[in-house]
Image: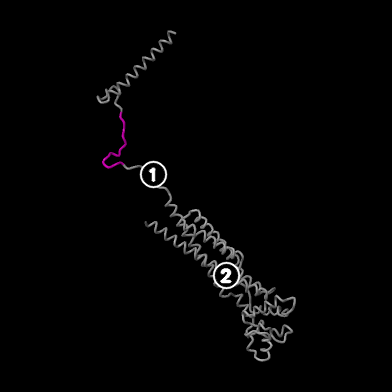
Amino acid sequence: MAREDAVRCLRCLLYSLNLLFWLMSICVLGVAAWLRDYLNTVLTLTAHTRLEEAAVLTYSPAVHPVIIAVCCFLIIVAMVGYCGTLKCNLLLLSWYFGSLLVIFCVELASGVWTYDEPSVQRSDMISLKSRMPNYGLQRYQWLTHTWNTFQTEFKCCGVIYFTDWLEMTEMEWPPDSCCSNQYPGCARHAHYRDLSDLHQEGCGPKIYSFIRGTKQLQVLRFLGVSIGVAQILAMTLTLTLLWALYYDRKPPEATPPEPPPGTDPKPLTITHPPQGEAPKSGNTRPAEAWSNTATTSNRHGHTQFEMETLS
């Protein structure tokens, strides 16, 4: 009874862990997709600068294709583990344990291989100004769209201050994406009327803060560590459940039947009487029958020998 309760408890824990794997994997995929979108925007603005290398080093472990593939595979493995636990199937549970072990090793190797502290300084933000003269040109529409998207999302303008647009380009006022309340011609109106309608903070510090790490990146790191700890716990519980199921299904060893009470358990021994001793009266008939049979066979043997001699 105690063993059945322990197996039931192990199954409930594995159900909970598999559900947790599904939820955490989906969260990792969602946050990684959000970060990948913003990372592409930052990489476009910081192309061919030290900021680009720092951004790649910081976010490559979070949005690396290997991590995305591992999370997708973990969802499938959790489904297999759920089915194996539900049916108490030793084969499915063994495959589940092996898959978790492989995934854990891949995650550990990927984390160690891609871990590196970015070496970036605030003075590197000045290099972003080299991307500003191409704003608005027909050949660089993609760059124009990236600047507008970043300034709108992060509520910034220019690199250090909105006057960077006036210094680095031939524009007389900043782009409309610098306005806190955007409408066509809002930047021109703010430049001549009220500068407070423009974002006062530059995009350089925003990019620097993004490269150093965001809250979303911290959430991804926490989820990664949590998945690793949950995998270790799931592998331990799976091994315990496999041992319990195998022990229950193992046939019991055959034991000799016990003698009934009141009987002598000693083995029976047969003793032969010594030569020359006459058998007891109760056993005279079998002995006499055996002697008659031997005498008859001897007579037949002598008769056959005599016939062969005469012939």
- In space, the residues marked 2 and 1 are separated at their CA atoms by 58 Å
| CA neighbours of label 2 inside 10 A, class few (<14), some (14 to 19), many (20+) | few
Give the camera-side residue of 271 and 102. Answer: 102
- Amino acid type, mark 2: Gly
Which element type, helix, strand or loop, lies under badge 2? helix
Residue 83 x %, y %: 49, 58
The quadrant of the image that shows the C terminus is top left
Name of the residue lying farthest toward the top: 310
Which element type, helix, strand or loop, lies under badge 1? loop
Q: Is residue 260 magenta?
A: yes
Q: Predominant secondary structure in magenta?
A: loop
Residue 111 falls in which quadrant of the image? bottom right
Residue under label 1, please give it: 254
Instruction: Tell me if 245 is positioned left or right of 71 in this view.
Output: left
Compared with 235, 172 (above or below) is below
Name of the residue lying farthest toward the bottom: 193
Q: Is residue 192 magenta?
A: no
Compared with 99, 199 (above or below) is below
Give the camera-side residue of 77 and 259. Answer: 77
Q: Earlier in the sequence, mark 2 or mark 1?
A: 2
The quadrant of the image that shows the N terminus is bottom left
Residue 204 x %, y %: 64, 80
Residue 256 falls in which quadrant of the image? top left
- Amino acid type, mark 1: Ala
Instruction: Write the residue at 32% across / 36% down.
Output: 267
- Please name which of the two marks, 2 or 1, marks the residue nearer to the observer: 2
Instruction: Tell me if 84 is positioned left or right of 127 in this view.
Output: left
On residue 65, which mark appears? none
Residue 105 x %, y %: 55, 61
What range is drawn magenta here? Answer: 259-271
Residue under label 2, please give it: 30
| CA neighbours of label 1 inside 10 A, class few (<14), some (14 to 19), many (20+) | few
